[in-house]
Image: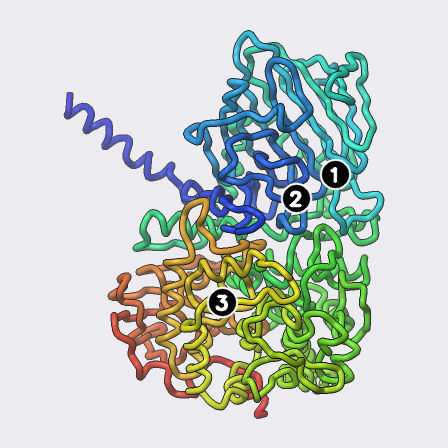
Amino acid sequence: MQRLLLSCLLVLLPWISHSAGLVDRVNPLLGTDSKRSFSHGNTYPAVATPFAMTFWTPQTGEPGDGWIYTYQQPSINAFKATHQPSPWIGDYGDFSLMPMTGRPQTDWRKRASSFQRSSEISRPYYYAVTLDKYKTKVEMTSTTRCGHLRITFPPSEPAYLSIHAHPQGAFIQMRPQEKKVCGFTRANNGGAPENFACYFVMVFDQPFSCAGMSADSLLHQDLQELTADQVFAFLQFASGQSVTVRIATSFISLEQAEQNLAAEIGDRSFAATRNRSRASWEKELRRIEIQGASKDQEITFYTALYRVLLFPRIWYEFDGQGRMHHFSPYDGHVHAGEMYADNGFWDTFRAVYPFFTILFPDRDAEIIRGWINAYREGGWFPKWCSPGYRDCMIGTHVESLVADAYCKGIREFDVQTAYEAMLKDGAQLTDQGGYGRTGLADYLQLGYVACDKTREATARTLEFAYDDFCIAQMAKALNKPQDEKIFSSRSFNYRNVWDSSVAMMRGRLADGSWKPDFDPFEWGGPFTEGSAWHYTWSVLHDVDGLIGLMGGREAFCGKLDSLFLLPPKFSVGHYRREIHEMTEMVACNMGQYAHGNQPVHHVLYLYAYAGQPWKTQKWVRHACTTLYGPGPDGLCGDEDNGQTSAWYLFSAMGFYPVTPGTPAYVLGSPLFKKVTLYLKNGKKFTIQADGHSPQNVYIQSIRLNGAVHSKTWLSHADIVNGGLLHLRMGDQPNTRFGVDPESAPYSFSRAAGR
Ligand code: CA
């Protein structure tokens, strides 16, 4: 008997290892143990294909609340089609479904059902749960623009499915003869033109009778068309059966939704859609192979990769001839070509787009073509788009995306038009907020944004200077010497907000004097979601220049050291209350280093510019192992459209893009023994860390393709040409490696001889 069991196991084992793909290492629940006052990621378990136009998620919160699904909530009240990029931005074009038995309810509290965690399966391509109250199982899978749901009702109870087209103008038409429901919702939180709608078509595999409901108590048995601010429809099915529904979405029309359904699902079964979605993830996740990781690290790593591959979302659809077209969130018309949406560039320019340049260069170019179309249709590049212009955060960082792609040889976009849009950001005054640079007039006249005239002025100055650097890089590449001169000069404007008397970046008034009563621990005011301790390092393009301001390499490293030695104290500044990023800084337990928010994401790498790269190695490894985990509380702040995950992917691989817009990455400390990147050009790049262990965080020596590598950085070409980066690790710093100023990464002032 035992031998039989053993031989069965031996037969099964290869099948098991084959079937357990990387996608099954992904935990979409990672980051969902979040609330308004403290973010462990502020994520929701999106069922989606990479960059999907519509995501699908269970809903535990109140409809319309940004916290759609939170791990601590014990009940589910709907299954929702969502486009939400962040709880702080909110959703649009969202609608939901909910199965019920007994008497149907519209009130979300009354219809909510508890569920057992053991019944919940959450994967990128599949979500399943059993609703205890209704003894009903719900399963979801999806394609780029469609959802596919299977609902299994219990025997001998009236079986209902509610469809809720969310407020702000909704329509539902029921066609029971065709087993079909059509409709739309105009729900949005801004950034959408008047005529915006998300259209949906649902096709069922079982007959239903229907009833519309305008209030909890009133069922209109005959009503088959409903138009109102928000609309509920109820479908009744024969009890005890499994109902499958294919749901298409479109931002263009109901006809387009029908086409999307035919193209993406057609007559396929639920299992076939699930298998295709699974394969679409597996293909992308296999672009990175890691060896020597613990199971928890594998989950953390591949979940980060899943998060990076969700945003920005595809916003184009295919017409009858198979050509891309899109409803424009900028002018409300349908145009040919690419469109993407849902990105806060303030977050994502730092590491998400540089990550795309290495492993997804075609996607990077296509996304940039989308932002160029946004410029054509709306007149400006977006700053935070969801789905169109939103007035959120600072800087005009599409400049960074363009310069970064171009300098790495990714140029399959209209470079001249992109450049024109960059120049407009850098030159044309507007205080609209949703695009352009608020405070630009002062910046041009004074060389900085005056903090008595514009809020978050010093943060703006620093980010404008970096964006100007990106424009200058493009001007140089496109042989525009006049522009290059102007924008190169402006990229040194960070010096105008440096106050040597406090040795920090500081708020400066229009009359040239410093903002009085300086408190380096005060958040906000001249800064954005951070203090002087965080923004003083925001000179992404000229760390050498910053080292000079601080009085040299020793002083610079000393100041970095104190960042970690200081207590995590803060004053609430103009926020007047403790915002979640402050609380998260305390929880990081790394002094003033606040990894829960983006301004400091490059800071651990700065020692590598100042001759003490072993401190970068130590702190990066520390952050990777203490600030990231595989569970619902696995992040230390907002995930933010892939940025916090991209930081981890890069840092776990052993390098990070401190200066997007230059083709280089600063070395840290690889988290795994071996990482292999499978590149689009067919080549592979391997990072091998001999002697790797939890204690051996320090680089002893490096060989790149067999040759001694003495620099603290890698070029983009080093990676995409393929090859082997071979590191030897140890438990003590090699204080001779990376000390020489010649081995330091790129800085603009050194490159420009200033
Ligand atoms: Ca953030």
* Amino acid residing under circle 2: His
Of the pair 180 and 561, the residue shown nearer to us: 561
- Disc 1 versus disc 2: distance between alpha carbons? 10 Å
> Looking at the rendering, which quadrant does residue 22 occupy?
top left
- Disc 1 versus disc 3: distance between alpha carbons? 45 Å
| Front tag of 2 and 3 | 3
Which is nearer the N-term, disc 2 or disc 3?
2
Q: Is residue 294 above or below residue 215?
A: below
The residue where tag 2 is placed is: 83
Taking the spot 67% from the left edge, 61% from the top edge, the residue there is 368
Q: Is residue 416 visible?
A: no
x and y percentages locating residue 172 in the rendered image:
77, 26
* Amino acid residing under circle 1: Cys
Label 2: how many Cα within 10 Å (few below 14, some 14–19, many 20+) = many
x and y percentages locating residue 120 in the rendered image:
46, 31
The local secondary structure at tag 2 comes to loop
Q: Is residue 249 above or below residue 549?
A: above
The residue where tag 3 is placed is: 569
Of the pair 656 and 510, the residue shown nearer to us: 510
> Looking at the rendering, which quadrant does residue 504 occupy?
bottom right
